[in-house]
Image (tube, rainbow, N blue to C red):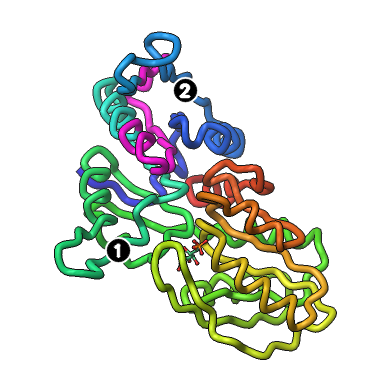
């Protein structure tokens, strides 16, 4: 059975947070003035010997409208999401509004080469089996929402980034590639500053090249914004180009801080790195809870 988006406007709600999104779930419950359901994630201290996961809802959700929140990264958190969805169905939850703060596998939103899966679709198909509506935050490609048969909506994490940057001096917002242009435009509009973009060519999962571009950045404070930072190669290259052209201060900002491998070391080239709480990292400095709450309220 499908439900319309925004169904929670008038109904009381309980929030269930998976272990990938505990802090954000807590913030969201506070914003919604809803109760946070207590969940146990271990049957035995240290978990099952074979590494399999366990969840148990410790409060009743029977007949309740539930907001379930869990990022699908890293992979075990996706299995945990499936377990939580099943636990909610078993416990008689009335409706599940699923929030996926970071939708892992969103970048494989098409078959790039013969023999590959459309990973985003594979995930969406399973996830929607036990969800009445789905919300993502700054999903890599909003077209991927079409893979869900239940109502699905993407919320922008950029207002949260702009909120943080409002407390800093920023003269220019820069998109490191084509895909990020809409993010830079959105943040720049909120900060009332200029924006620009670079052209990136991805060589493989680890290596990128950025086409040289002359920019008017001498003495300016620049924020580079992107949906996510993984290896940090994109931002490091953009930072190098900005430094060479005389930028005074460089802030790297993303919604999803994956920071794989040595990303945070590579990003020491920036003056500051910021990320939201869709994924927790040492760079998490601002919450997207207000943005999620405002669409659920
Ligand atoms: C790609 O289009 C994304 O928006 C990011 O720019 C990219 O995934 C960042 O990857 P990395 O940090 O590994 O350069």
Q: Which mark is residue 37?
A: 2
Q: Is residue 166 left or right of residue 104?
A: right
For the residue labelled by badge 2, is the local secondary structure a helix, a strand or a loop? Answer: loop
Decide whether residue 189 is among the magenta residues. Answer: no
Q: Nearer the viewer, residue 242 or 285?
A: 242
Task: Please check the rendered image and state whether residue 69 is part of the magenta-colored stretch, yes or no.
Answer: yes
Mark 1 highlights which residue? 109
Question: Residue at 35% of width from left, 48% of height from top?
Answer: 134
Q: Is residue 15 visible?
A: no
> What's the magenta region?
55-80
Q: Choose top left, top right, bottom left or bottom right for residue 127.
A: top left
What residue is rendered at 70% in x and 81% in y?
194
First of labels 2, 1 by sequence position: 2
Task: Judge depth for marks 2 and 1 and give the one in front.
Answer: 1
Residue pictured at 46% horizontal, 68% vertical? 207
Q: Is residue 114 visible?
A: yes
């Amino acid at each position: 059975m499908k439900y319309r988006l925004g169904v929670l406007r008038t109904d009381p709600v309980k929030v269930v947070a998976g272990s990938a999104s505990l802090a954000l779930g807590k913030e969201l419950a506070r914003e919604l003035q809803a109760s946070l359901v207590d969940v146990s994630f271990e049957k035995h201290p240290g978990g099952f010997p074979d590494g399999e996961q366990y969840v148990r809802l410790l409060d009743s959700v029977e007949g309740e409208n539930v907001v379930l929140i869990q990022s699908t990264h890293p992979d075990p958190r996706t299995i945990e999401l499936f377990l939580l969805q099943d636990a909610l169905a078993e416990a008689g939850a009335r409706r599940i509004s699923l929030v996926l703060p970071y939708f892992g596998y969103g970048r494989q939103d098409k078959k790039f080469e013969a023999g590959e899966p459309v990973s985003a679709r594979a995930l969406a198909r399973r996830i929607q089996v036990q969800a009445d509506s789905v919300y993502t935050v700054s999903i890599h490609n909003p077209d991927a929402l079409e893979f869900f048969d239940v109502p699905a909506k993407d919320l922008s994490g950029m207002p949260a980034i702009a909120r943080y940057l409002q407390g800093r001096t920023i003269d220019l917002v820069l998109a490191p590639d084509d895909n990020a242009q809409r993010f830079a435009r959105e943040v720049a509009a909120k900060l009332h500053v200029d924006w620009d973009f670079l052209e990136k060519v991805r060589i493989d999962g680890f290596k990128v090249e950025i086409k040289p571009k002359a920019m008017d950045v001498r003495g300016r404070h620049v924020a580079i914004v992107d949906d996510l930072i993984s290896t940090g190669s994109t931002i490091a290259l953009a930072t190098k180009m900005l430094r060479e052209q005389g930028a005074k201060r460089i802030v790297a900002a993303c919604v999803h801080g994956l920071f794989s491998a040595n990303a945070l070391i590579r990003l020491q080239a920036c003056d500051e790195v910021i990320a939201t709480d869709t994924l927790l990292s040492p760079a998490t400095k601002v919450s997207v809870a207000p943005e999620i709450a405002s669409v659920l309220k």
